[in-house]
Amino acid sequence: MAPLTMRIITKPSAPEVAATRRRRRWTLAVAVPLAVLLLAVATIYLWPLGDGRLRRSEAPTLGFADATAAAQRQVARDETDATVRPECRTQLLTHGQRASRTVLMLHGYTGCPADFQALARVFFDRGYNVYVPREPRHGRVDKDAHEFVTATELVDYADTSAGIAAGLGSEFGVVGLSGGGNLATWLTEYRGDVKRALLLAPFYAPDASQAPPMLIKPMTVLWGRRVLPDRRNGDMFYSALAQYLQIRANYKDHPVNESLTSLAVVTSGADHLINVDEAFALPGEIARTNDVPLTEYKIPAAQNLPHDIVGPASIGPAAADLYPRYLTMYEAV
């Protein structure tokens, strides 16, 4: 028979009990907030960005008479709206009849149709009918009105404008600057009547110096849905910028457009606002999927041209070289 053993259990001292309690409180104080933080981060990164309206075109292509009337109504509305700055009114340049070619020009975030006034004339003189609509909440006397623009508004605007512009001519294409380049890309993916597209400094994502890539999804979720108080960078609002990121998140995985014949992309080597790699990579994917040529041009950094590579006041004397180049790139095939 095995000998009996005795275990002597000693009661913890008061200091030991107090120390144990302190460790437990410290553990809870750290673990609970950390768990909440990890859950919040996971929720943000897993939050779905899909939106049905951002994944389909709804606007029909109008006939020439209806398209002309719709464009003229938009021009008239801007002319009689005292809250719209005169230089920012919608522009319509037509030859009085359905042209063989028509182009839609979409300005960027915080911009307005004035940015395209000179380039629109270059295309018009080439024989195009040209439509340059004002983006929702832009070009206002209140220059901060664009803060509350939404992704749905932007897509509706681009889609409806495309339905008008496409009715003004037999061949339809689009030119877009910055956020307008984002919308032009959306049209190229979701409308089957876009034959040509010229994307000028397209904004798909900010440069890493503006926002690291790992913060794009949180920015899209938190500011795009206006969960966080808004912030601004110069004349730009985070919540409005995030609307374009939301649109970008709804691009097709395999963007097939059987009408597409050419794509062109231009950026400035001195532009530190957009992700330039994305500016070329996304159109490149569309071009490869549809087996069409992609014409690329990066304006030398030595020219020190800013993000806006269209507005006459922005590019100055460089317009003499760039405008004809843009036209040639647009008409690549």
Image: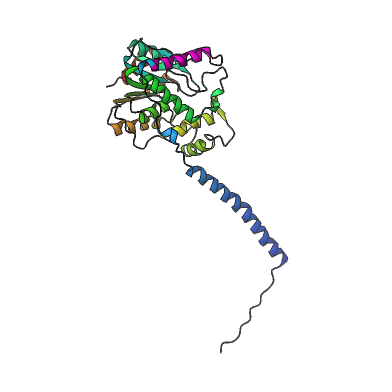
Of 303 and 22, the residue lying toward us: 22
Looking at the rendered image, the quarter that the C terminus falls into is top left
- Residue 289: which quarter of the image? top left
On the question of residue 270 being in view, the answer is no
Residue 35 is left or right of residue 166, and the answer is: right
On the question of residue 39 being in view, the answer is yes
Residue 125 drawn above or below residue 199: above
Residue 140 is left or right of residue 190, and the answer is: right
Q: Residue at x 33, y 32 (%)?
A: 286
Residue 138 is left or right of residue 6, and the answer is: left
The dominant secondary structure in magenta is helix
Q: How is the image coloured?
A: rainbow
- Magenta segment boundaries in residue numbering: 66-87
Give coordinates of residue 299: x percent, y percent.
Answer: 38, 22
Looking at the rendered image, the quarter that the N terminus falls into is bottom right
- Considering every residue shown, the one lying at the far bottom of the view is 1
Residue 123 drawn above or below residue 250: above
Give coordinates of residue 205: x percent, y percent.
Answer: 45, 32
Of 220 and 26, the residue lying toward us: 220
How many dots with numbers? 0
- Residue 8: which quarter of the image? bottom right
- Considering every residue shown, the one lying at the far right of the view is 14
Q: Residue at x 53, y 45 (%)?
A: 41
Indicate whether residue 74 is drawn in magenta. yes
Give coordinates of residue 100: x percent, y percent.
Answer: 30, 15
